[in-house]
Image (spheres, coloured by chain):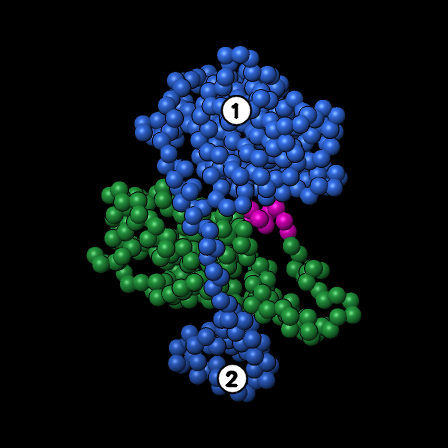
Chain colours: A blue, B green
Amino acid sequence: MNEGRCLDIGSRLAAYIEQELSVAEARLVRAHLERCPVCRADAARMGRALEGLRRLQPVALPTDLRGQLFARIALSERPARPALGRLRWAGAAAALALAVVSTAVVMRTGRDAGTRAAGPSAVRIETAKSREPIAAMDPVSAMDPISAMDPSRERPVSGPPLGVTPQPIGPGSAPAQPLAAQPDRRLASAGKPLGAPESMLDVADKRGVTARILLADRDRAKADRVARAYWDGEKADGVEPRTTGLRPAGHAYNASMDGPSPGWNDRVRIGDTVTELRGEAEWDDSGRLRTMRVSAETLAASEAEAAPEMER
Amino acid sequence: MVWNRAVNRAPATTASDPDEAAVTRFVAGDREAFGELFDRHGSYVYNIVHGVLNSEDDARDVTQEVFLQVHRSLHTFRRGSRFSTWLYRIALNRALDAARAHRRRRCVPLGVEAENRPAPGADPASHLDARSAEDEVRRVLQHLEPRHRDVLVLRYMQDMDIEEMAEVLGCSASAAKVRLFRARLKFKQCYEAIVGRHERE
């Protein structure tokens, strides 16, 4: 038996085992195998490998996947917010439309024991153009605070944080969407447009409890590094984090809570510019972050993309 | 879970095709129809994606992305072609995209499986017994190129024949055949390298 013949048979072994050959070809292979122990051994090995493949069983569809999917669909079908007007961007002639999206990537809390006071607190942050959040990241109660984090160690991994300074709400300046009455509510605002992907807001109530909201589209690796930095910080303090991983959603990354993730963001796209980021957070009296709501307004990368949203 | 492979072998689209009826209703504004489509095909899509990615988290994400994309673009679905083929092609492409992205992020060299090795002093045979043969096969699949993995997933997990695979892969039947041949060969080589080594140990 010549070598070429064995090679020829070898290329047909899998099809022979799977009974995909014609009758004539199968007969040829069978006859060769009867005479050639090398090919017979090869066929036996191929048979074992294919048997493994044939034994593969379907995996069960996660029971909560349907609910998550339809929550996202419902979110994507919500009517777009009214236009804020036509804007010009960097001299572009085309006007761009605004879409309202909701996003949050990394949230963390920290506290400064020296300035802590008893009692629940709530913080509202919003940029100059406040809009109603379209989604709530809730519950966030699964997230653990970072204990005794030294603020001086906090440095942005992916760019400087926005200069958001918590400010007390004065008389008559009640926010548009108040949380439940909270004596410590504060308002923080940013007076300039935010720039993706490094948009982040650091907010702190008067006790020094801070929450960081980070929007990081485009670059998952960067978001991962940020999350990792927080993770390490938390580990350094001996507190296990409960930030449940970053999940891709379109090109944005949202913090994902257990259960349905209404914060999924499938409207943000590469090239979109985040113009406003707004959120509110509430802690319980132990410093645990209870709820956080985040919304962002983006300038779509192209008018064509945003136009259908505007017409709804 | 009800697993009905027959849906993969659905007859060519006809007026009585439940998928086509659901698509028609959805386009006409019946949102419930999309739920029907998900219920009929969700498991298949999830299994295609899971077969390529071998990660529940990733499969969950990508499956949702697939159906979101379908939800957005169902009105562009070309009548006369089979909905399931169209859907599975989207699923496969999405899964392959995710696999490539994953590959760029983390390279798993063939043969480095420290976490899977038996503890020192442990009985290798019992170690092998403890591991599900199915897990072993799935792990071997992960060592293949996505273009080899996908065709094996369609053939062995979705039970498709060459013609169906060709439709989903978007190639000719002969090209699908060649791809399957190469994939089987690669799989055998990896299977022997990984499983064979464990057995020798």
Q: Quadrant of residue B111?
A: bottom right
Q: Residues within 10 Å of mark 2 (few under 14, many from 20)?
A: some
Foreground: A20 or A29?
A20
Secondary element under disc 1, as helix, strand or loop, is: loop
Secondary structure mostly taken by the magenta-highlighted segment of the chain: helix
The N terminus of chain B: image quadrant? bottom left
Vertical comparison of A191 with A135: above or below = above
Secondary element under disc 2, as helix, strand or loop, is: helix
Q: Which mark is residue A32?
A: 2
Q: Residue furthest left?
A: B15
Count of marks overlaid on the render: 2
Q: Chain of mark 1?
A: A
Foreground: B107 or A195?
A195
Residue A230: where, in percent of width, then height?
A: 67, 36
Q: Identify residue for label 1.
A: A181
**Residue at the image position 65 percent from the left and 34 percent from the top:** A286
Q: Nearer the viewer, mark 1 or mark 2?
A: 1
Q: Is residue A180 magenta?
A: no
Q: Residue furthest right?
A: B121
